Image (cartoon, rainbow, N blue to C red):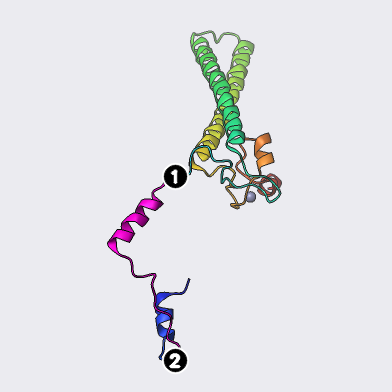
Amino acid sequence: MAGKSGAEAAVDETTEPAPRKTTARTPAAKKSAAKKTSTPRRSAKSAVTDLPVLEKEDPWTPEELAEVRTELEADRERLQAEVDEAEADLAELMRDSGEGSGDDQADAGAATWEREHELSLTNNAKELLEQIEHALERIDEGTYGVCESCGNAIGKMRLQAFPRATLCLTCKQKQERR
Ligand SMILES: [Zn+2]
């Protein structure tokens, strides 16, 4: 589209432009135009979503996205249960160790190991949970599938295999080489 000022500057007597009719808009015309643009927004069940995919991939369909979401939600539920259980175990271990049973060093060592083991499991599960929450947020925001490092598409196939992925394969490999 030609810039307004540019078009005006180019006007001289010999090259008179055709009368402009686009600017002549009556209030009534404006009103009906506004009405037209307020047609229902992209309905929820469009054929495909506009999430990024790799060049050779087909766009995400709402069904495919729903599948990934369901998987993430199931994982979240499972992990949350794991974390809850581990934290209950941990609380128990803490309580036991606090009950003056420190006479046996081997027992104390085993208890410590168990507690630390439980703690690292909990932390792993928590980290996974965070990644899952993050992926679900990205689905809600419509940014799912964008590499968080380079901004390219992560790839549908990769996400279907690893729904929590936030990096494209190239960036992931770069990160792993570090
Ligand atoms: Zn990337």
Q: Magenta stretch?
A: 14-40
The picture places residue 25, in percent across and down from the top left corner, at 33, 66
Amino acid type for the residue under numbered disc 1: Arg
Is residue 36 shown in magenta?
yes
Under 8 Å from ligand 1: the CB of mark 1? no
Q: Name the residue located 62 percent from the left edge and 39 percent from the top edge.
A: 165
Q: Where, by quadrant of the figure, is residue 9 drawn? A: bottom left
Out of 91 and 147, give the one closest to the viewer: 147
The residue nearer to you, when weighing 45 against 5, is: 45
Q: Is residue 95 above or below residue 150?
A: above
Contact? badges 1 and 2 (CB < 8 Å): no
Is residue 63 shown above or below 91?
A: below
Q: Which residue is disc 1 drawn over?
A: 41
Is-magenta flag for residue 63? no
Determine which quarter of the picture holds residue 11: bottom left
Instruction: Indicate the amino acid at tag 2.
Output: Thr
* Residue 16 image position (x, y, % from top left): 42, 86
Report helix, strand or loop for mark 1. Answer: loop
Which of the 4 image quarters holds residue 22?
bottom left
Is label 2 in a helix, a strand or a loop?
Answer: loop
**Residue tagged by mark 2?**
14
Q: Is residue 166 above or below residue 81?
A: below
